[in-house]
Image (spheres, rainbow, N blue to C red):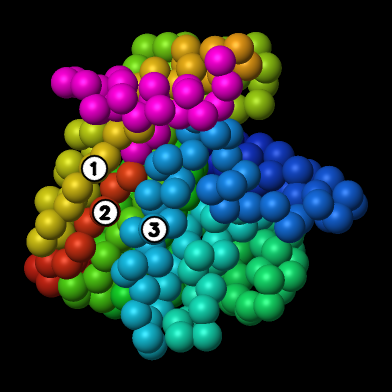
Amino acid sequence: MLEKNQAEEDRVIEAMRYGANAATILDNGAYDVGGSESVQFVLRDPYLRYETIVAANLRFGMRVLELGAGTGRHSLVLCSNRIETVCSDIAPKALEVLQLRIISKGHSVETVATPMESTPFPNNYFDLVVSAGSLSYADPETLDVEIARILKPGGSFICVDSLNHNPIYRFNRWIQWRIKKDRTRSTLVRMPTINRMRQLGEHFESWELEGYGAASWLLLPLSRIIGNAICARLSTFCDKLPGARRMAFKFVFVARGLKKEILNAT
């Protein structure tokens, strides 16, 4: 468990880190790369799946929020003249990069600098809430309540993120925290689990979770020898094996039809 002071300190560290990364992007002017095409070939499938599902769920007149949008690597799929899109993040400088990315593609988007678990939006405000890799940056219970609060009854939540089950990936994150110092302890403790996503899914009429990259720890280095295309096919094959979801690196979660009684309870 995390103490409140530790969580707040980690929040400041993450905001500074992502703000500094965004400042570097602004200085270099390299803000036009994004989406699933910017992800390593072996790990691209879950992001392609996420983008496909999000695009299929957009409807004319919808109000959509992306939580923890960062510099907007996966925000373009949300931008359309048909809908009202809001992208939020704790780092204002990251949102500057996001704006440039979206504008460079001929779209516009509203941005709000805010922690994910305490947004300024009213109850029952959004038809769809999405997230791409940001769930570990907020307290799980508080964030899940916030998602339910700002979603309209019958609304949907879609995300792509990393799981916390495979011991190889857990060890790698530990190295990033203790040795490389490019993670905070909060992000390790808060990494999503299947049980956490199942509990969130129970607040909706239906939900599904797909696992990806169970063998990517091996296939990523192997791709330098046998090539990306072969490794991508091997990854897809491994992900279909029995029990693969428990060893998955990435997942796509889709929950539809928020139950009204959940909103009333919060």
Q: Earlier in the sequence, mark 3 or mark 1?
A: 3
Q: In terms of depth relative to the viewer, which is nearer, 207 or 88?
A: 207
Q: Is residue 240 magenta?
A: yes
Label 3 to label 1: alpha-carbon separation: 15 Å
The chief SS type of the magenta part is helix
Q: Are marks 1 and 2 in contact (CB under 8 Å)?
A: yes
- Quadrant in which the C terminus is drawn: bottom left
Q: Position of residue 82 (x, y in %)?
A: 46, 85
Q: Quick check: 205 above or below 163?
A: below
Can residue 165 be seen?
no
**What's the residue at 63%, 40% (across, down)?**
14
Q: Position of residue 164 (x, y in %)?
A: 36, 25
- What residue did someone put label 1 on? 209
Q: Position of residue 159 (x, y in %)?
A: 37, 51
Question: What secondary structure is found at the residue carrying circle 3?
Answer: helix
Kindly identify the amino acid type of the residue bearing the numbered disc 3. Thr
**What's the residue at 35%, 29% (across, down)?**
236
Q: Quadrant of residue 17?
A: top right
Badge nearest the viewer, 3 or 1: 3
Can residue 110 be seen?
yes
Kindly identify the amino acid type of the residue bearing the numbered disc 2. Val
- Quadrant in which the N terminus is drawn: top left
Q: Quick check: 48 above or below 77?
A: above
- Please provide the residue range marked out in magenta: 226-251
Which disc number belongs to residue 254? 2
Label 2 to label 3: alpha-carbon separation: 12 Å
Question: What secondary structure is found at the residue carrying circle 2?
Answer: strand
Q: Residue at the far right: name it.
A: 27
Which disc number belongs to residue 39? none
Question: What secondary structure is found at the residue carrying circle 1?
Answer: strand
- What residue did someone put label 3 on? 52
